[in-house]
Amino acid sequence: MAKDPVRVLVTGAAGQIGYALVPMIARGVMLGADQSVILHMLDIPPAAEALNGVKMELVDAAFPLLKGVVATTDVVEACKGVNIAVMVGGFPRKEGMERKDVMSKNVSIYKSQASALEAHAAANCKVLVVANPANTNALILKEFAPSIPEKNITCLTRLDHNRALGQVSERLSVQVSDVKNVIIWGNHSSTQYPDVTHATVKTSAGERPVRELVADDAWLNGEFISTVQQRGAAIIKARKFSSALSAASSACDHIRDWVIGTPKGTWVSMGVYSDGSYDVPAGLIYSFPVTCKNGEWSIVQGLSIDEFSRNKLDKTAEELSEEKALAYSCLA
């Protein structure tokens, strides 16, 4: 029996990430090859013509799973009945801008979009915030969409998680699919902590710890971490544009695992509402290792945290607490 179409909202849909993301969703990368979708695409009025061009291309691509397209600059129309919302649109930091100026702009955007989702989205809508500062934008959205369960509001750190998998696979010359259980702790920023303490690699002799195979703690505790932390900046330097393809692909991974579930014995990284696990202050949107089942995520519990890791977890939590305070001051 055919499944009912899922309505998926993408904000900032005429931008680079949106342009990479919408065909992936339409092709089934996000929700599976048997799940039809209706795409809702939102962008700002100056991008209306470009947004219509994206809609034209979606029609021209004749995706069998795509059962409809809503392309609009009206936030209420965009949010009507959506089951999944991928919040790509935001105000980027420009040269000479203070952090508070950027935060103020994004607080305004996310307050408005949260109110529209609150009033018009489907019950149990799942929300993924991609636009930076992703963790704090997600927190603001949660504040202004109180009827959306806090477990349904997340932010994207899967891109960082995938970057960490990629670095390990390149270092060891193994398939990236054979590496699992890296962790991104904290903020989607340069204070994030990519952690391989519990990660393993599938070998002919069974699963073995990444740290044992790499056999270079100096690299794992130094260059590996900074490479993952600074990868976005390195891509901007090389491409003259920010990460679009990898961000879109990671957003699909995030939603797919959340909806369909993570493989047994495997966890992924998601920015979720902290309940105080691992002594992370409750009330922050913080990246943890999670497993997913039946459309719900759960933080992986009981992992050992050494002193090196503890310091990293605390540093990124401190930054998120500062961001939260800054965002709330913009609401005053």
Image: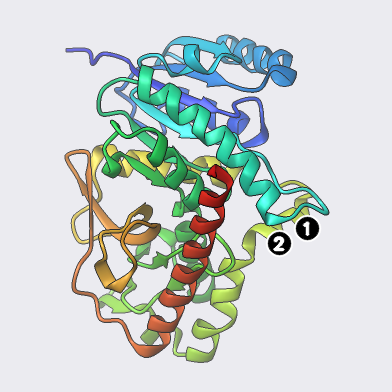
Between 84 and 68, the one lying in front of the other is: 84
In this orientation, does residue 302 appear? yes
Q: Secondary structure at mark 1?
A: helix
To which quarter of the image does residue 83 belong? Answer: top left
Residue sitting at 33 percent across and 87 percent down? 306
Q: Quadrant of residue 154?
A: top left
Q: Secondary structure at mark 2?
A: helix
Vertical placement of residue 246 versus 86, above or below = below
Q: Amino acid at mark 2?
A: Ala
From what the image shows, is residue 53 above or below residue 271? above
Q: Is 126 on the left or on the right of 141, as rendered?
A: left
Q: Residue at x 61, y 37 (%)?
A: 90
Where residue 191 sits in the image (x, y, percent)?
54, 70
**Image quadrant where one finds the C terminus:** top right
Check contact, mark 2 vs mark 1: CB within 8 A: yes
In the rendered image, residue 12, in percent from the top left (x then y), is placed at 60, 29
Residue under label 1: 237
Residue 318 image offset from top left, x and y in percent = 48, 71
Name the residue located 51 percent from the left edge and 11 percent from the top edge: 70
| 123 vs 53, nearest the viewer | 123
Considering every residue shown, the one lying at the far right of the view is 96
Front in this rendered view, residue 220 or 119: 119
Residue with the mark numbered 2: 234
Residue 202 visible, this angle:
no
The residue positioned farthest toward the front in the image shown:
332
Q: Amino acid at mark 1?
A: Lys
At x 50% / y 33%, what residue is drawn? 111
**How many neighbours does mark 1 have within 10 angstroms: few (below 14), some (14-19), or many (20 or more)?**
few
Nearest to the observer: residue 110 or residue 190: 110
Question: Residue 205 got which mark?
Answer: none
Q: Marks 2/1: CA distance? A: 5 Å
Q: How is the image coloured?
A: rainbow
